[in-house]
């Protein structure tokens, strides 16, 4: 299914898997759902008010890490963050924050304001514990432990330590009114592909089921926004290490079929779990978002949408598609006897892939616009209506 060079190559990059930053898109004020929604996939019509969540709590990997990895293991250096922040901002992309206020990483103690929520996502994280690398420290259950501690201590600190903490921590009622967002699983799938064991997919899906129930029953969470995983076989770092001698292993758009099939198998089972959760958690409003289809549409229609070759890396050096695992974005290389920084391409706005594993700000923005409008959601409701059940 794979060769040894591919496994070695992708294992080095598992901490960087992958794509979209979708957080912090909803204004901060109280809201409680009132009326039902009338909607369908083709034409969305709403009869209820928007859900203005007072807080967001996010769980995931580098898809949505806003500084957890950097706070723990060292800052993601330049040119990461250059497009919007004009400086490194704790994420592996040039991407902007997609709304206000900015959702601070739970692990970042410097200047953080958690009054409107916290981000527990950390690059390289998995749903299940992994044995292949000692660097992955924050699987989903650890993130849930962190959230439990945050919830418990927030109440204590707000009561005991005065106005400063009251302004920096969420109110008690926010935890039941918040939106809980999840984008995780891609790193698990990489490991599963290496091990050639699809049976593990169903096992990690059950891990997700347990964690959702903990938030619902133990923490009072009621509103859930759940992403499936994207087309792993369309990522440049995967394609760079994938055997090239069998054309039948690639689809018409140049993506590796076996890895995309693993992602689709995961998504199928995740959707079944969401259906079961709706039965088990009757008070919860759970939205399942088809990130796979959104991202695959972007890849397959890249030129039509104004982008260049979707596999050419913007921030890279050498190798096929301007990507070499040894000379990644932000590292230093020797050119003509001088040490130079591996920097961004001249125009990131026409590139989809930022560094081999992550998307550019322009690609992330395109993905966000399509996931936020509800056309790829089940039920088909936009992000700002996710407090409503259907």
Image (cartoon, helix red, strand yellow):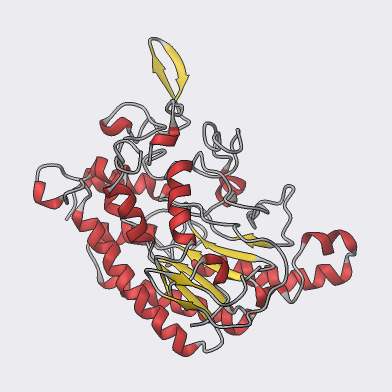
Q: In the visual, does 214 lie left or right of 353? A: right
Q: In the visual, does 137 lie left or right of 260? A: right
Give 360 or 44, whichever is nearer the viewer: 44
> Which residue is rendered at x = 57% and y = 63% of the image?
58
Which image quadrant for residue 267?
bottom left
Give 146 or 351, whichever is nearer the viewer: 351
Percent position (x, y) of residue 302?
31, 43
Query: Can residue 134 be seen at all in this image of the molecule?
Result: no
> Which residue is rendered at x = 54% and y = 45% of the image?
91
Q: Quadrant of the N terminus?
A: bottom left
Q: Where is 157 relative to 242, above or below?
A: below
Percent position (x, y) of residue 74?
58, 41
Q: Where is 302 relative to 384, above or below?
A: above
> Which residue is rendered at x = 36% and y = 73% of the image?
270
Query: Can residue 223 be seen at all in this image of the molecule?
Result: yes
Name the residue at the top extreme: 337
Which image quadrant for residue 379?
bottom left
Give 124 or 386, whichever is nearer the viewer: 386
Percent position (x, y) of residue 112?
72, 52
Give 334 or 184, whichever is nearer the viewer: 184
Percent position (x, y) of residue 333?
41, 22
Q: How many marks?
A: 0
Q: In the visual, does 265 lie left or right of 346? A: left
Q: In the visual, does 234 lie left or right of 288? A: left
């Amino acid at each position: 299914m794979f060769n040894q060079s591919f496994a070695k190559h992708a294992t080095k990059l598992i901490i960087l898997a992958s794509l979209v930053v979708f957080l912090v898109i909803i204004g901060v004020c109280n809201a409680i759902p009132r009326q039902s929604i009338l909607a369908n996939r083709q034409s969305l019509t709403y009869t209820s008010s928007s859900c203005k969540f007072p807080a967001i709590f996010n769980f995931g990997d580098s898809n949505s890490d806003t500084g957890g990895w950097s706070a723990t293991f060292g800052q993601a250096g330049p040119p990461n963050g250059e497009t919007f922040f004009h400086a490194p901002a704790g994420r592996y992309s040039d991407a902007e924050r997609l709304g206000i206020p900015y959702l601070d990483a739970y692990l970042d103690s410097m200047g953080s304001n958690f009054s409107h929520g916290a981000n527990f996502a950390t690059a390289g994280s998995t749903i299940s514990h992994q044995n292949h690398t000692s660097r992955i420290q924050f699987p989903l259950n650890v993130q849930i432990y962190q959230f439990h501690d945050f919830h418990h201590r927030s109440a204590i600190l707000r009561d005991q330590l005065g106005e400063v903490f009251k302004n920096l921590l969420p109110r008690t009622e926010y935890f039941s009114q918040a939106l809980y967002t999840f984008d995780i699983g891609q790193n698990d799938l990489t490991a599963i592909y290496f091990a050639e064991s699809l049976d593990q997919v169903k096992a990690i899906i059950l891990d997700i089921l347990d964690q959702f129930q903990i938030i619902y029953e133990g923490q009072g969470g009621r509103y859930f926004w759940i992403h499936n995983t994207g087309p792993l076989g369309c990522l440049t770092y995967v394609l760079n290490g994938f055997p090239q001698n069998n054309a039948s292993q690639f689809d018409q758009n140049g993506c590796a079929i076996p890895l995309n099939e693993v992602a689709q198998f995961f998504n199928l089972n995740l959707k079944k779990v969401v259906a079961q959760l709706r039965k088990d958690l009757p008070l919860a409003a759970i939205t399942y978002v088809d990130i796979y289809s959104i991202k695959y549409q972007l890849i397959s229609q890249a030129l039509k949408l104004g982008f260049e070759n979707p596999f050419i890396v913007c921030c890279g050096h050498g190798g096929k598609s301007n990507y070499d695992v040894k000379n990644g974005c932000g590292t230093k290389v020797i050119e003509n006897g001088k040490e130079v920084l591996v920097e961004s391409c001249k125009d990131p706005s026409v590139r989809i892939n930022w560094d081999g594993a992550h998307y550019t700000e322009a690609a992330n923005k395109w993905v966000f616009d399509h996931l936020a409008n509800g056309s790829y959601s089940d039920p088909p409701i936009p992000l700002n209506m996710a407090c409503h059940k259907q």
